[in-house]
Amino acid sequence: MNENVARAEELRAQGRPREAQEFADRAIAAAEAIVAQDPADAQARWVLAGQLYNRASLRSELDDYAAGAADAWQSLTLYEPLAAESPQHLPTCADARARLAWMLANAGLADADMGSPRDHAAQAVATYERLVADDPALRPDLARVHYLHAEVLRILEGEGTPASVAAYAACVREYQSLGPLTGNSLRLCADGALRLAYGYAANDAHTGQRDAAREAMDRFAELLNQGVGAHAHYARAILLLSDAQAALGDPEWEQSWVDFEYVLSQLPAPLPADLAPFKEQLKRR
């Protein structure tokens, strides 16, 4: 089983998710056989739950959200009794619940057995809030599930609803409280701030849009300095900042617009659909 797990991870890292799934399937089959031999073996159930959780994530890369939701649901049903037996499994159980919520929302599923994506996402946040009270080291995980909660609400309700704006704001606040960010935490903070700016923009809340866009711009600049390609999102953040500044009568909007034009000019073709019209405007000047 370990060889299959390692090969699946290797192929996934190489951007070959479909091939990786073949090895993930083999690893899960092996884990299921072990659990079938001894259903009371908690370690075997934990391993199987983890492999199902990983395959759910892998299936999201293939846009197979319905199958991913089924894997996430099975993973959660294994983790829940383990968490009831041992609190050390509570974070992993909350992660599986958040993954299930995100998969269900993307799949557009309303499954009576698997439950509500809204409820699952909110429960994952509530679990981490309780855990963080005793272990502050889990704050990055709380921020991450805030992000997933916000994504679920945006997918289900659309951009700029009060609930999704509040969830993205909670995500950004939590990340800001952590100090310097790197890796996935930095990326999720940047994405969350950008989504928050869009949410405020949808409600003509220009001050909130300005502050969130500036946060997103700064975070995407950090990512770019670390060699992570986020140029399009960086351009979007600057555009949102310029628009908010203009609406607030801030003369700095012009410099932000110049910055946006420069970043846009550096983006390779083809441009994303939302940015392409701006490039055409520059060509006509």
Image: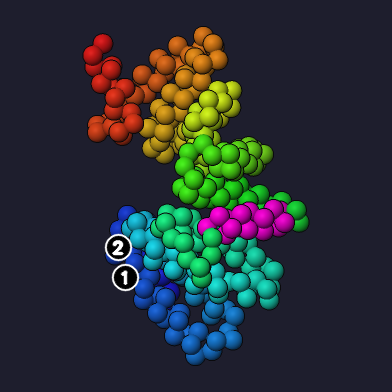
- Percent across and percent down for residue 231 are 38, 32
Dot 1 corresponds to which residue?
22
Disc count in the image? 2
Q: Quadrant of the N terminus?
A: bottom left
Per the image, label 1 sits on a secondary structure element best described as helix
Q: Quadrant of the C terminus?
A: top left
Dot 2 corresponds to which residue?
18
- Percent across and percent down for residue 84 are 68, 73
Q: Quadrant of residue 189?
A: top right
Magenta segment: 117-132
> Around disc 1, counting alpha carbons within 10 Å, would you say few (fewer than 14), some (14 to 19), or many (20 or more)?
few
- The amino acid marked with disc number 2 is Arg
- Could you tell me if residue 88 is visible in this image? yes
In the image, residue 58 sits, relative to residue 43, either above or below, namely above
Say whether residue 37 is left or right of residue 133: left
Q: Nearer the viewer, residue 162 or 263?
A: 162
